Image (tube, helix red, strand yellow):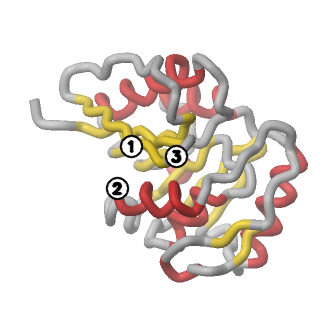
Amino acid sequence: MIRVSGGRFKGRRLDLAPAVGTRPSSAKVREALASAVGERWNGRVVADLFAGSGALGIEALSRGALHTIFVELDPRAVRVLRSNLEGLGLGADEARVRRADAWRWLAKLERGELPQGQRPTVLLADPPYHPGILARLLPPLFRLVDSGALALCAVEHAAGQTELPPAPVGVGLRTRCHGRSAFSIVERVDP
């Protein structure tokens, strides 16, 4: 069990996903991420990739996001995620769960194949802490931010991961470490 760290659901309990390989974002990391993102998710559609129990996306909803799309493949995690949303009283107007492979969903987003109501402007991701994951995940996020399809992306990862690919001109990448975890934020920057 973990608790929502801020906003309208602050202190509310969330059950953890029992899926193999899932690891909940710590309260410290979620709080730091919320501080780094600030109000830039207010009133926006947010996607939570590799959602697990939904902690990141629920934190965004708690702190002002308009709607969150949760993308998770594991059926056990999806059951826990839906239970967490139901326990908070979040219906389809604020939260939608997509049982889907995050990589395929991201590819559809990049190709512009998602229906209008399922296109986020902020993307949060907490993928497994596998070597090479950032080298695979960051390039499509760079392209989505560079094209203007996304305003901001935040990716949680292990603090020791050093395989961050260089961001293209006009796209910023900044990383903050918190113990064994870190998050990197991708956003447009003035050249």
- Indicate whether 51 appears above or below 90: above
Q: Amino acid at mark 1?
A: Arg
Neighbor class of circle 3 (other Cα within 10 Å; few <14, some 14-19, many 20+) is: few
Neighbor class of circle 2 (other Cα within 10 Å; few <14, some 14-19, many 20+) is: some
Disc 1 marks which residue? 176
Q: How many marks?
A: 3
Q: Circle 1 — which element?
A: strand
Query: Where residue 12 sits in the image (x, y, percent)?
Result: 67, 79
Q: Which mark is residue 93?
A: none
Q: Circle 3 — which element?
A: loop
Neighbor class of circle 1 (other Cα within 10 Å; few <14, some 14-19, many 20+) is: some
Query: Where residue 13 sits in the image (x, y, percent)?
Result: 72, 75
Q: Amino acid at mark 2?
A: Ala
- Indicate whether 6 appears above or below 59: below
Disc 2 marks which residue? 36
Q: Residue at x 33, y 63 (%)?
A: 38
Which mark is first along the chain, 2 or 1? 2
| Foreground disc of the pair 3, 2 | 3
Query: Where residue 62 sits in the image (x, y, percent)?
Result: 53, 73
Disc 3 marks which residue? 179
Query: Where residue 165 sits in the image (x, y, percent)?
Result: 39, 17
Asked whether the residues under the numbered discs 1 and 2 touch, taking CB atoms below 8 Å apart as contact, a structural biologist would say yes
